[in-house]
Image: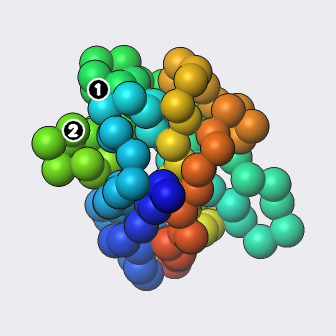
Amino acid sequence: QVQLVESGGGLVQAGGSLRLSCAASGLTFSNYVMGWFRQAPGKEREFVAAVSRSGGVTNYAGSVKGRFTISRDNTENTVSLQMNNLKPEDTAIYYCAANRWGTVSSQVGSYADWGQGTQVTVSS
């Protein structure tokens, strides 16, 4: 079965950087659009970024555009999220997700497979 394992979360001061990684197994990785989502306490899960199967097309939420960069390595079956200039409002659990059939969708329902999440906390 599909397994997605996130890593790289932690505590960082505002203005700092973190790099999240997601290792995928149990799937033909290059057949999947990959996405990152996040969920803060008391809020709904929201889209952060997505990358196409080849890595050539990306999509970002407006709140992170220019600060976050999504990338993938189809030889290593990994997808990464480089987060720069972090803000306290970026604090959330970050989830990696896989989408077999769609494009670089921002919709939670487009992604069938999810990781367990990694906590990112940004202090002010």
Q: What residue type is labelled 2?
A: Asn
For residue 53, side relative to residue 43 (left or right): left
The image shows residue 37, relative to residue 102, as above or below, that is: below
Tag 2 secondary structure: loop
The kind of residue tagged 1 is Gly
Q: Mark 1 points at which residue?
A: 55
- Residue 64 shown left or right of residue 19 in the figure: right
* Residue shown at the point (39%, 46%) measured from the top left: 27
The alpha-carbon separation of the residues under discs 2 and 1 comes to 9 Å
Residue at (77% x, 71% y) in the render: 41
| Residue sitting farthest toward the front | 1
Residue 97 in the image: x percent, y percent?
53, 48
**Marks 2, 1: nearer the viewer:** 2
- Write the residue at 52% across / 31% down: 100
Residue 67 appears anywhere in the view: no
Which residue does the numbered mark 2 point to in the structure image?
74
Residue 81 lies, in percent from the top left, at 36, 50
